[in-house]
C-alpha cells in the first residue's frame, strides 16, 4: 500500500508478534512509534498530522485509553471488541487514505466476532 519494503517488513514483524504474543505490553504514545522505526528518514511522519492525532484521540476515547497508558495487547483487543463496530470505521476514519482498502473494518469485524487477527500470508 505504498510503504517501503523495510517499513512493510517491520510492520509485519510487529503485527505477527502481537498476534502470537497477546500478553505483549503496549505503551500508547503520540507520534512515531515502533511501527515507524523503519520509516524513511527523509519523509515527514504522517502520524504527526493534526488529522491523524484527532482520529487517534477519537479511538483512544472510545477504547478508554489515553497517551502514556500501558496495557497488554489482549486487553486492547478486548476493549475494541466491547467498544467498536465495523460500521464505526468509515465515520471515524472518513479522511484516512487507507480506508478504501477495508483493512481496519475487516480487523474490527474479526475482533468483534472473537476471531482475532489472521496470520499474514506466507511470502513467496
Image: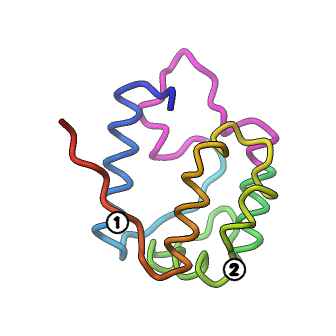
Q: Residue at x 21, y 47 (%)?
A: 122
Decide whether residue 37 is among the magenta residues.
yes
Q: Residue tagged by mark 2?
A: 83
**Which residue is disc 1 drawn over?**
19
Q: How many marks?
A: 2
Q: Is residue 51 left or right of residue 107?
A: right
How far across and how far down the image is residue 53, in percent? 76, 48
Earlier residue among tags 1 and 2: 1
Residue 20 in the image, given as x and y percentages of width and height = 28, 67
- List x then y, in percent, for residue 79: 60, 80
| Circle 1 Cα neighbour tier, 10 Å, few/some/many (<14 / 14–19 / ≥20) | some
The crowd level at tag 2 (other Cα within 10 Å; few <14, some 14-19, many 20+) is: some
- Residue found 61% across the figure and 60% down from its top: 105
Q: Is residue 18 above or below residue 23?
A: above
| Quadrant housing the C terminus | top left
Toward which corner of the image does residue 82 lie, by quadrant? Answer: bottom right
Front residue of this view, candidates 1 and 15: 1
Say which element carries label 2: helix
In the rendered structure, the answer to whether residue 21 lies left or right of residue 95 reads: left
Q: Residue 86 occupies which quadrant of the picture? A: bottom right
* Residue 78, magenta (yes or no): no
Q: CA distance from mark 1 to mark 2?
A: 20 Å
The residue segment tinted magenta is 32-53
Amino acid at each position: 500500500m505504498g510503504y517501503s519494503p523495510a517499513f512493510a517488513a517491520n510492520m509485519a514483524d510487529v503485527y505477527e508478534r502481537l498476534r502470537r504474543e497477546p500478553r505483549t505490553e503496549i505503551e500508547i504514545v503520540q507520534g512515531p512509534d515502533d511501527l515507524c522505526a523503519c520509516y524513511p528518514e527523509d519523509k515527514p511522519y504522517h502520524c504527526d498530522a493534526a488529522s491523524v492525532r484527532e482520529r487517534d484521540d477519537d479511538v483512544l476515547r472510545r477504547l478508554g485509553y489515553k497517551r502514556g497508558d500501558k496495557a497488554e495487547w489482549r486487553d486492547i483487543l478486548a476493549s475494541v471488541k466491547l467498544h467498536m463496530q465495523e460500521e464505526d470505521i468509515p465515520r471515524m476514519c472518513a479522511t484516512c487514505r487507507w480506508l478504501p482498502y477495508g483493512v481496519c473494518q475487516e480487523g474490527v469485524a474479526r475482533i468483534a466476532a472473537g476471531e482475532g487477527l489472521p496470520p499474514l500470508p506466507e511470502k513467496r
